Image (tube, rainbow, N blue to C red):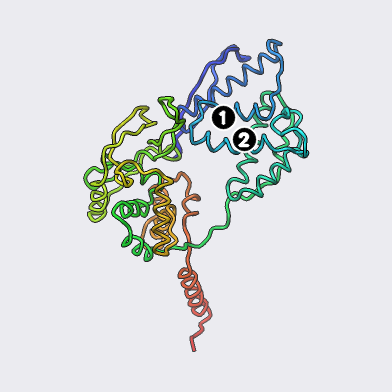
């Protein structure tokens, strides 16, 4: 069951009922209060315009996108994600030699300004990045319609792009993992065990000594780029962040063989100081999957090491394939309900879990064989 949190903030100016309290809901209290703050700010801006307190100032596209997505309160990973998208949209020139799109005021922008930029974006990007641009602009114009800065939303007429590419068949099987495992060092062996246990790569790299209690593993964080809390020269630090989709934790029991591999890898680790964004403080941890120096392993460096191993062995394994094998294997061979698999993978929707179910050539052969037997049985046919 989905849980919601409630939050409220006070606006500067009263509502028609004389009160100033604005309510909103969200997955967490922080999200709910942020949504309530947005409603209160929109009300204050509208009240000032209606009462002649402040002049109506329509922002440019660059100003509106910067205010919306590139503000200092934005998490660093989200900031990096939006920065390239905003820059692409704002620097595009609808007319050769003319103004950049970011210099247009919002009430000047029409569909024929956005469409060539959007098509250029789609040519250079694939997958989820295509609808991402449309969703960002669509949400921006909807917001400024509420603020009465514009009256139309040209972004809603942009062509829709498919959100997901056709699911490919699984290129790797559990039998292939043995080759990877035999060729891997102890650190990568521990990583492969955690990935096959359905952990994401960021979650596997965030498993620390304190995550293991007896034979139970509890995952509370994932590693990620964070804003540097000390404000030093580097804008970001590699530290511990909350789990994806605001999940509280993942917990499961390990076999003795799995425990021995994780403990063996842990012997190579040394105490490393990292910033915990959830606790908002610096902490010292020993990571179960350390880098060559015994400290925390950066995501990109881990991917390079894993790629080198897969190319050496000739097995096309990627970190997320572990989750696909986990879901497909449980559904195919074990008497486990789909809802139990959904919960173990941290999904709120069963449809998301079903996207991880992948077939292979052997499945196609089994389907054809079973269908043939059923047809023969249905019509009373016998094999020659």
Q: Specify whether 314 is left or right of 93.
A: left
| Displayed quadrant of residue 213 | top left
Q: Looking at the image, which is closer to me, 323 or 348?
A: 323
In the image, residue 315 above or below residue 114: below
Q: Residue at x 32, y 43 (%)?
A: 207
Compared with 23, 263 (above or below) is below
Rendered image: mark on residue 86: 2
Label 1 sits on a secondary structure element that is loop
- Choose between 117 and 247: the one closer to the eye: 117
Q: Report the residue that reaches farthest toward the bottom.
A: 384
Q: Position of residue 56 (x, y in %)?
A: 71, 17
Q: Are marks 1 and 2 in contact (CB under 8 Å)?
A: yes
Q: Could you classify mark 2 by the number of other residues whose Cα lies within 10 Å: few (under 14), some (14-19), or many (20 or more)?
A: many
Please tell me whether mark 2 sits on a helix, a strand or a loop: helix
Give the position of the N terminus as an image quadrant. top left
Above or below residue 54? Residue 377 is below
**Residue 53: x and y, percent?**
68, 10
As rendered, which of 337 and 77 lies closer to the eye? 77
Instruction: From the viewer's side, name the closer residue of 163 and 346.
Output: 163
Position of 267 with respect to 124 (left or right) is: left
| Labelled disc at residue 70 | 1
Residue 161 is left or right of residue 195, and the answer is right
Residue at the spot x=65%, y=36% of the render?
A: 137
């Amino acid at each position: 069951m989905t849980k919601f949190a409630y939050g409220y903030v006070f606006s500067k100016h009263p509502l028609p009922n004389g009160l100033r309290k604005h309510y909103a809901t969200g997955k967490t209290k922080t999200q709910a209060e942020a949504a309530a703050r947005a409603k209160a700010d929109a009300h204050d801006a509208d009240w000032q315009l209606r009462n002649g307190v402040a002049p109506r100032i329509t922002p440019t596209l660059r100003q509106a996108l910067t205010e919306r997505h590139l503000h200092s309160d934005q998490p660093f990973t989200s900031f990096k994600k939006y920065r390239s998208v905003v820059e692409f949209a704002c620097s595009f020139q609808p007319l050769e030699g003319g103004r950049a799109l970011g210099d247009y005021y919002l009430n000047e922008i029409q569909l024929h300004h956005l469409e060539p930029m959007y098509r250029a974006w789609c040519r250079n990007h694939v997958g989820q990045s295509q609808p991402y641009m449309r969703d960002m602009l669509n949400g921006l114009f909807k917001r400024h319609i509420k603020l009465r800065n514009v009256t139309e939303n040209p972004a809603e007429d942009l062509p829709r792009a498919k959100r997901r590419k056709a699911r490919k068949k699984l290129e790797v099987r559990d039998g292939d993992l043995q080759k990877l495992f035999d060729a891997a060092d102890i650190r990568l062996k521990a990583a492969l065990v955690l990935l096959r246990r359905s952990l994401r790569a960021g979650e596997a790299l965030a498993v620390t000594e304190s995550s293991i209690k007896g034979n139970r593993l509890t995952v509370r964080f994932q590693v990620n780029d964070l804003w540097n809390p000390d404000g030093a020269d580097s804008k970001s630090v590699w530290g511990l962040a909350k789990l994806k989709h605001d999940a509280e934790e993942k917990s499961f029991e390990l076999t003795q063989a799995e425990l021995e591999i994780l403990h063996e890898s842990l012997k190579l680790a040394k105490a490393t100081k990292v910033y915990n964004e959830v606790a908002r403080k610096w902490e010292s941890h020993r990571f179960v999957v350390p880098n060559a120096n015994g400290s925390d392993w950066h995501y990109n460096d881990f991917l390079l090491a894993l790629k080198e191993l897969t190319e050496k062995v000739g097995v096309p394994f990627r970190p997320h394939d572990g989750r696909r094998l986990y879901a497909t294997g449980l559904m195919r061979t074990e008497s486990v309900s789909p809802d139990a698999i959904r919960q173990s993978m941290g999904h709120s929707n069963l449809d998301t879990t079903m996207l991880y179910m992948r077939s292979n050539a052997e499945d196609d052969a089994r389907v054809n064989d079973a269908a043939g037997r059923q047809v023969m049985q249905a019509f009373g046919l016998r094999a020659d």
